[in-house]
Amino acid sequence: MAEETKIEKKIERKGDENVVFIGSKPFMNYVTGVVMQFTTKGSKEVVIKARGKFISRAVDIAEVSTKRFLKEHNIAVKNIKIDSEEFENKEGRRVNVSIIEITLVKK
């Protein structure tokens, strides 16, 4: 049973290889992560995901990555998906939080 869980986690991680989750680390760490996905790992597509207050940061990271660091690699925004997710906060109340997924693709 434990072995199945390990296999499932590997499959989940494999699907997340080209995903950059935005949080509170320094801005350039995320830009570097996006750039490395396209240059070093040879990804054709990278998804930038963020929730709540980090959404504007995700947009900035996508713009800086494509227009400043990956200009010669012909990277463009393929899709932008917005949604909301409901969860329970520390006080036990149900709260909606916004989500954005920005898909960058190599032309």
Image: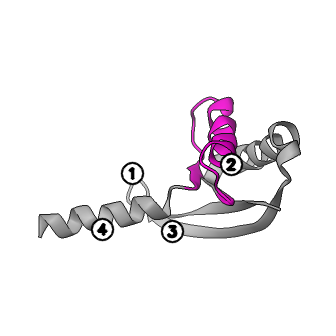
- Residue 86 numbered tag: 3
Tell me the element at label 4. helix
- Tell me the kind of residue under disc 3: Glu
- Tell me the kind of residue under disc 4: Glu
Quarter of the image where the C terminus is located = bottom right
Residue toward you, 101 or 104? 104
Near mark 2 (Cα within 10 A), the count class, few <14, some 14-19 or many ≥20, is many
Q: Is residue 25 left or right of residue 7?
A: right
The residue at which mark 1 appears reads as 90
Tell me the element at label 3. strand
Q: Is residue 56 left or right of residue 53?
A: right
The residue at which mark 2 appears reads as 38
The spot of residue 24 in percent (x, y) is: 57, 36
Above or below for 65 versus 49: above
Above or below for 95 versus 21: below
Marks 2 and 3, the one that precedes in the sequence = 2
**Colouring mode (rainbow / by chain / secondary structure / one colour):** one colour
- Tell me the kind of residue under disc 2: Phe
Tell me the element at label 2. helix
- Tell me the kind of residue under disc 1: Lys
Q: Can residue 49 be seen?
A: yes
